[in-house]
Image (cartoon, rainbow, N blue to C red):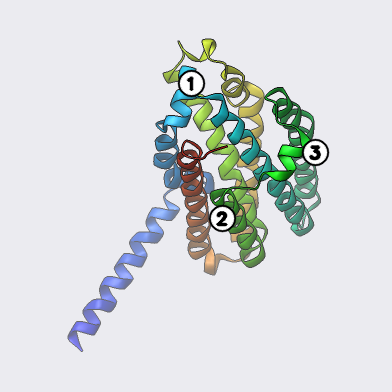
């Protein structure tokens, strides 16, 4: 009996401490960053990205990346449209419409033409399949939307956008002397320019506002729900890191 009381006391103390940690930070985005930052940093050290920055990555590996990123973008757009249908307030619906529009333009007006410059035609694009990591990654996000809803899906997709902004900034800082000479410099420029950084920040701010609105309506589950979102974000960051690892090993 004494042991059970002691365990209960420790459990209550741990729960109280946990809540203090969660609520010591003002925004969901700060908690998400804490969960993912070490994984993003690890991504910047992956051979695929390092060789891109140094300009020594074999073009066949980059071609394969472009194909796999294309498959990811197609699923990304599908998930965005799922989220649009789940958005409750008009402002968020408009925001989702904007993201869908931008992503579709990136996919069909930028990504496909860039693949063609690399010699990737329609036939090759149609015959090639998504690798296992891309399949598992996008399936995981679809599952979160279906089981956990709008906020979970928004959190999962933000991880990709935010990780690219982080990688673009960190790699540009570290490889500032080699990236300008790299055949892949346009890739790093795309994810470190002011416009991309500002667009990503807009997404972060929108997620924070949505989270604040949700927890204000359901304070009894705020800590549990916040932890769940953080775990989803972390899992997506793990998939992202795994993808960078696998891309260096995959045969086109």
- Tell me the residue at 54%/31% (across/down): 61
Tag shown at residue 136 = 2
Cα–Cα span, label 3 and label 2: 25 Å
Ranked by sequence position, the earlier of labels 1 and 2 is 1
- Tell me the residue at 47%/31% (across/down): 48
Q: Which residue is mark 3?
A: 101
Point out the image quarter for the N terminus. Answer: bottom left
Is 105 placed left or right of 15 in the picture? right
Q: Nearer the viewer, residue 236 or 252?
A: 252
Above-or-below relation of 245 to 185: below
- Tell me the residue at 59%/27% (across/down): 191
Q: Nearer the viewer, residue 60 or 108?
A: 60
Q: Secondary structure at mark 2?
A: helix
Q: Secondary structure at mark 1?
A: helix
Is 84 placed left or right of 228 in the picture? right
- Tell me the residue at 47%/59% (across/down): 227
Q: Which residue is mark 1?
A: 53
**What is the x, y in percent for residue 143?**
62, 62
Q: Quadrant of residue 16?
A: bottom left
Cα–Cα span, label 1 and label 2: 27 Å
Is 249 placed left or right of 160 in the picture? left
**What is the x, y in percent for residue 109?**
79, 30
Tag shown at residue 179 = none
Point out the image quarter for the C terminus. Answer: top right
**For the residue carrying disc 3, how many other residues have a C-alpha within 10 Å: few (<14), some (14-19), or many (20+)?**
few
Q: Nearer the viewer, residue 92 or 137?
A: 137
Above-or-below relation of 132 to 222: above
């Amino acid at each position: 009996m004494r042991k059970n009381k002691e365990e209960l006391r420790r459990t209550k103390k741990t729960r109280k401490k946990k809540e203090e940690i969660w609520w010591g930070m003002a925004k969901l985005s700060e908690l998400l960053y804490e969960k993912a930052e070490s994984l993003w940093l690890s991504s910047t050290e992956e051979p695929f990205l390092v060789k891109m920055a140094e300009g020594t990555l074999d073009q066949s590996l980059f071609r394969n990346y472009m194909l796999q990123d294309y498959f990811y973008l197609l699923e990304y757009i599908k998930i965005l449209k799922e989220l649009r249908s789940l958005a409750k307030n008009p402002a968020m619906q408009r925001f989702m419409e904007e993201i869908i529009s931008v992503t579709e333009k990136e996919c069909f007006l930028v990504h496909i033409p860039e693949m063609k410059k690399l010699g990737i035609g329609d036939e090759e694009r149609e015959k090639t399949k998504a690798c296992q990591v891309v399949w598992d990654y996008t399936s995981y996000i679809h599952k979160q939307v279906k089981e956990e809803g709008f906020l979970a899906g928004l959190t999962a997709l933000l991880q990709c956008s935010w990780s690219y902004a982080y990688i673009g900034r960190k790699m540009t800082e570290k490889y500032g002397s080699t990236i300008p000479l790299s055949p892949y410099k346009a890739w790093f420029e795309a994810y470190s320019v002011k416009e991309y950084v500002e667009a990503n920040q807009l997404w972060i701010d929108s997620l924070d506002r949505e989270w604040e609105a949700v927890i204000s309506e359901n304070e009894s589950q705020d800590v549990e729900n916040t932890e769940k979102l953080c775990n989803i974000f972390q899992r997506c960051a793990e998939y992202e890191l795994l993808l960078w690892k696998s891309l260096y090993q995959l045969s086109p």
